[in-house]
Structures are given as C-alpha cells and as structure tokens.
Image (cartoon, rainbow, N blue to C red):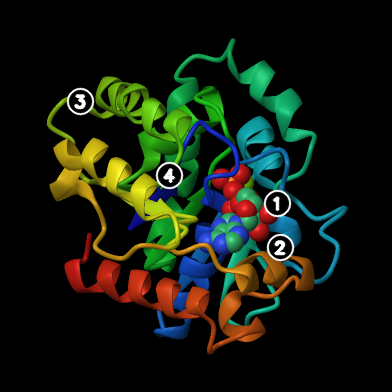
Amino acid sequence: MVISIINQKGGTGKTTTSINLSSGLCQQGKMTLVIDIDPQANATTGLNYETTQGHLSIKDILENGIDPSEAVANTYREGLKLIPSNIKLSVTAEQLYSKVFREALLSKALKPLSKQYEYIIIDCPPNLGVLTVNAIYASDFIIIPCETSRSSLDGINDLLNVIALIKGKTFTNYRLLLTLLDNRNKLTNEIVMDELAPFQEKLFSTVISRNEALNQSQFAREDIFTFDPKSRGAQDYQNLTMELLRHEC
Ligand SMILES: Nc1ncnc2c1ncn2[C@@H]1O[C@H](COP(=O)(O)OP(=O)(O)O)[C@@H](O)[C@H]1O
Ligand SMILES: [Mg+2]
C-alpha cells in the first residue's frame, strides 16, 4: 500500500508523521519503505544517521530512470528502509514539467517495489507542484496532517480539489490528521472542530498533540519510540499506527 503524507503548507507535521508512522509500522513487523520527495530532505536527514551524500536518490529514479531498488538505503531503525532525497531534486522537478506523462513517473517506478514492501510512505514537499502530483497519482491512500490554524484549514479544500482532479471524484481514500494540537487552547480547538465538522467521517480518531519530545527527537535524529517511548508523542503515533492497521486504510 502506497501512502502519501500531503499538505501544501509547511510545518503541519508531514515529516514528523512520515518518520514516526513508518517507524510504528516497522515496529509492528511490517516491511516499510519511506520515500522522501521533498528537496529539503528533512525525512532523509531525520532517518539516516549516515550521510546519504553520494548515495543514489529519488532524483536518479525520476530523472534517469534507474532501478529504484538501487536507491534504497538503510535507516537507523533496523528493517526500515529509505529512498533519500537531496536539494538537487528541485532542479529535477523543474525539468519534469516538460516531460510527457510526467505525473505517472513515480507510480511507474514504484511498481516493482510495491511487491516487496507492505507499506510505502511518501513524505511530500509543502506545495502542490509536480512532485506532489506524482505522489498523489501513485497513492492508494492519502494522509493530510492539519494543524489548528486558519491557513491550514483553508488549504484543505484546495488540496481535495487537486486530489479529485488527479484520482477522480470517486476517490475517497484519504484521512485528515489533526496535528500539533495544544490541549490548553480549548476555545481554538472547539472552533477547529466546528470547521472540520463537514469532514467528520474523514478524520482520524487519533489526534497528535503538541509534544516537545517529538520536536527534540528530530534534533536527536531518532524516531519517537527510540527517543522517548513513554512520551505523549510516542503514544499518539502508536495510536495512529494501530488505527491505520485496524482499518487497513
Ligand atoms: N506534535 C508535535 N509536537 C511538537 N513539535 C512538533 C510536532 N509535530 C511536528 N513538530 C515540529 O514542528 C516542526 C514542523 O514539523 P514537520 O514535521 O517538519 O512539518 P512539515 O514536514 O509539514 O513541514 C518541526 O520542527 C517538528 O519537530
Ligand atoms: Mg517536511
């Protein structure tokens, strides 16, 4: 199953979710691969102790059509694999605009890998450009992390329109995930829940609270289960993993 983590806004918890959901799935014994398609490469630096400089990356797959299995790297978590990204991917993205069938490149490349991995998690950049369009095209399921701000909520309809354009209006295999929730801001949270009422059926019941351990774990370059398994963040991402597995979304 290919799952993309998408929101065109930055800082909504996409990379944090990619790293910790994939670690959670891996802990449950699932063969899991993370694909970083963000030129900022935060999932790559977050998951890989060793420098991936010189290692083949998603750029080589999209630009040169190399065998994708050659670009698979190890992460600090045993069993969890990564196809890394780097800043040069931004140049590739510009070049892709002139290619025929450009939106299907990633989907085609993933075909052989989807036999090998039960879950492929794609960490997307904060825009709706050609890389995100490739991820949507390749996805069986889409997770949209939203934080509780006006601009984050305003972007949801735009994103859903783009998803409908690419996958067709009948595609409903997406869920919104509330992230960075501050439990002290009761009034804001009520307003947010009202705004999200039309999406009620599309919300994960799991909510990711704001938790400093999640932020610190990224400095330590560890997933939350390694960094602080007793933290609220570890509990939240464990719940998300189990909810995903329960519903086999
Ligand atoms: N639940 C959370 N609690 C505290 N900090 C978080 C949480 N989720 C993400 N962060 C922090 O917020 C910042 C943005 O998160 P990130 O996952 O990189 O967002 P995105 O990939 O959508 O840009 C990072 O510094 C990250 O450590
Ligand atoms: Mg990110």
- In the image, 213: left or right of 91? left
Residue type at tag 3:
Gly
Q: Identify the residue under disc 2.
A: 46
Q: Is residue 69 in view from this perspective?
A: no
Crowding near pointer 4: few (<14 within 10 Å), some, many (20+)?
Answer: some
Image quarter for residue 101?
top left
Q: Are marks 1 and 2 in contact (CB under 8 Å)?
A: yes
Q: Residue 42 has which mark?
A: 1
Q: Is residue 151 in view from this perspective?
A: yes
Q: Which of the two discs, 1 and 4, sits closer to the camera?
A: 4
User: Label 2's element?
Assistant: helix
Relative image position of residue 212 (x, y in whole percent): 63, 69
Q: Which of the two discs, 1 and 3, sits closer to the camera?
A: 1
User: CA–CA distance between discs 1 and 3?
Assistant: 31 Å
Q: Is residue 232 above or below residue 52?
A: below
Q: Identify the residue under disc 3.
A: 168
- Which residue is depicted at the point 24% across and 63% down? 205
Q: Nearer the viewer, residue 225 or 12?
A: 12
Q: Earlier in the sequence, mark 1 or mark 4?
A: 1
Q: Identify the residue under disc 4.
A: 148
Image quarter for residue 129?
top right
- In the image, 19: left or right of 59? left
Residue type at tag 1:
Asn
Q: Earlier in the sequence, mark 2 or mark 3?
A: 2
